Image (cartoon, helix red, strand yellow):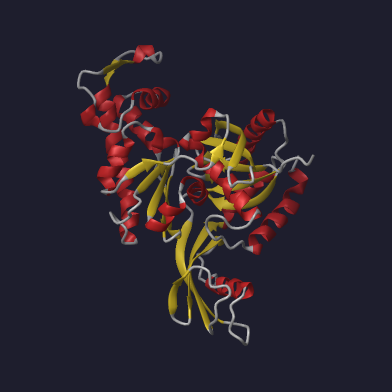
Amino acid sequence: MATPKLTAGLDIGSTAIRVAVAQGTGGGHLQVIGLAEVPAEGISRGLVTSIEDAVSAISSCLEKAERLTGTPVEHAWIGINGSHILAQSSHGVIAVAKPNGEIGEDDITRVVEAAQAVATPPNYEILHVLPRSFTVDSQPGIKDPIGMTGVRLEVEAQIIEGQSAQIKNLTKCVYRTGIDIDDLVLAVLACGEVILSKRQRELGVAVINLGGATTSLLVCEEGDPLHVAVLPVGAGHITNDIAIGLRTSIDVAEKLKVDYGYAVAAEVGKREDVDLAEISDEEGVVSRRQVAEIIEARLEEIFELVDRELIKIERSGKLPAGIVLTGGGAKLPGILEVAKRSFRLPATLGYPLEVLSPLERVNDPAFSTALGLVRWGMAQEGGPVGFKLSQLPSMAGIFARLKERFKSIIP
């Protein structure tokens, strides 16, 4: 009996590194058999700050996953994040090749390549080219032009770029753990793959991935990504604010946020207090209302920065499917009320769709990126299911060259 093929997703975050291992069920569902999480080291705001520490943390997470599944992780889809990520719109135009004017797959490939001919900033590389819509002989809004007849084919695409040095540092860390890279995927795109329904993507929706040190935004409309942004603020900043405001240590501030935090200060009683001696070695009593005020103020600031991105694309308050919050920071009680008020839109928590697993943590928003990477990988291996991603041979070439270069230091 053939062994079912396993797909792994590796989410390298600023506060935690997470791995998800799953296999397809044949019905479009993911059968998750392993989830592992370890604290991140050597990573700050999505950027590698110490290769040795990062390799050690990634190896530890992979070993944990292998013990759970009983199967070695030999290759994985890697999530890339960080404020160095840039996104820009691009337009490509070609003449249809066949004399009878029928559009084929080679024409799609050529028009997407034409869209890639954009001026990238120095030391940046293209990660993804995401076709949004095609135009055939001035007829816009076409999703799949294959088989249609025309003379002129155009495409509107979203180009996502990453800093070359950061891409190389990240791939070097992964290769030194001894596993192969299937591809790099922007973390928030992978998130959207697993928590958004087809209807939400069609109507218009924004995914906000509230991580430890970064907040990522993905806006989808008419089934395709419209805008992507990564902001250098996250849930870790809330912890820092609590530590400064209450003059406590970072560890105590994190416990206060997780165990007693609430995002809407008005709903917390003025006389509700927390005795620090019960949760730490520190002495003193702090007000839960004060903790909530600090949390609410920082959340409003983060959401204001996200709303500025929506204003740029003229979608502020105009997304029918609303806001979907995910990531570890989205677990704060009361956060949905703040989101609804800040964005003037409906807001929900994003949970993985069509995922089967006996593991309780499969519905933890913190694992949505790792699960999304698995779903993305299965979609690319078995044909496009979610976003139409144009794979770039240049990235595969980069990985091959890097592996050869680092072969001497790979265990």
Can residue 93 be seen here? yes
Q: Is residue 155 above or below residue 128?
A: below
**Residue depicted at x 53% and y 56%:** 162
Q: Position of residue 243 (x, y in %)?
A: 35, 28
Q: Nearer the viewer, residue 155 or 24?
A: 24
Q: Is residue 340 above or below residue 142?
A: above
- Does residue 48 appear in the picture of this structure? no
Residue 159 image point, x, y percent: 50, 63
- Residue 398, above or below 364: below
Residue 273 located left or right of residue 278 = left
Picture coordinates of residue 75 (x, y %)?
Answer: 69, 45
- 339 or 135: which is nearer to us? 135
Question: What residue lies at 34% left-to-right and 15% top-to-bottom?
Answer: 276
Name the foreground residue: 166 vs 174. Answer: 174
Image check: 307 left or right of 227? left
Q: Quadrant of the C terminus?
A: top right
Can you tell which quarter of the image residue 244 is in?
top left
State which quadrant residue 292 falls in: top left
- Note whether 25 is above or below 386 in the view shown: above
Q: Residue at x 60, y 76 (%)?
A: 107
Residue 341 drawn at (x, y percent): 25, 43
